Amino acid sequence: MAVTIAAPITGTVIPLTEVPDPVFAKALVGPGTAIDPGEATTLTVTAPVSGKLTSLKPHAFVISHRPDQGVLVHLGIDTVHLKGAGFTLRAEAGRQVEAGEEIVVWDLAAAREAEKSMVVPVVVLEADAENLTLPEEGPISAGDTLIRIG
């Protein structure tokens, strides 16, 4: 059964290999893609898929859409060092969420001030790259199809 992963933010799709972090760039976490929010000052980050919000930190979250597979959305690179500054959580870990539901509001000022990358990797955990259909590089709007599984 095919699963559609939607873009959690609006921006420009870039290949995972261009993410300025080797863990993501080498797909060590899993295959996927990334979105560059460009000059945005605030991002409303939405659930890319319906499922259980199994992990929620200010800078990252995982939604399990199947018992054996989830989608990781990581807000920026090395943003864990911001200790939550600029992130407002709009959901609670452990509950079901629907695709398009608001999960985090991210004010990018703190991240820009700390000179962090704003790139948002979207990775499918426990997936094989050959099972994913990834988007072309270019503009995308939140809610548009980003990745197809299967």
Image (tube, helix red, strand yellow):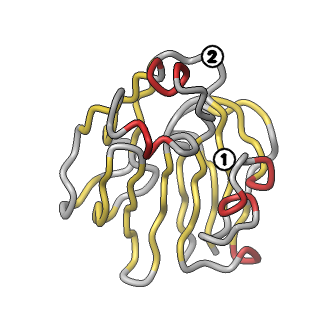
Please name the residue that numbered disc 2 is placed on. Answer: 39
Q: Position of residue 66 (x, y in %)?
A: 40, 77
Q: Which structural element holds mark 2?
A: loop
Q: Position of residue 141 (x, y in %)?
A: 59, 31
Q: Between residues 24 and 72, which one lies in front from this camera angle? A: 24
Q: Quadrant of the N terminus?
A: bottom right
In the shown orientation, is residue 86 left or right of residue 71?
left
Q: Amino acid at mark 1?
A: Ala
Q: Amino acid at mark 2?
A: Glu
Q: Which structural element holds mark 1?
A: strand
| Relative vertical location of residue 3 with respect to residue 87 in this rendering, above or below | below
In the shown orientation, is residue 18 left or right of residue 123?
right
Q: Quadrant of the C terminus?
A: bottom right
Q: Quadrant of residue 144?
A: top right
Q: Position of residue 69 (x, y in %)?
A: 46, 77
Q: Residue furthest bottom?
A: 68
Distance between mark 2 and mark 1 Cα atoms: 16 Å
**Counting residues from the N terminus, which is met first, the one under dot 2 or under dot 1?**
1
| Mark 1 burial class by Cα count in 10 Å: few <14, some 14-19, many 20+ | many
Please name the residue that numbered disc 1 is placed on. Answer: 34
Q: Residue at x 60, y 27 (%)?
A: 115
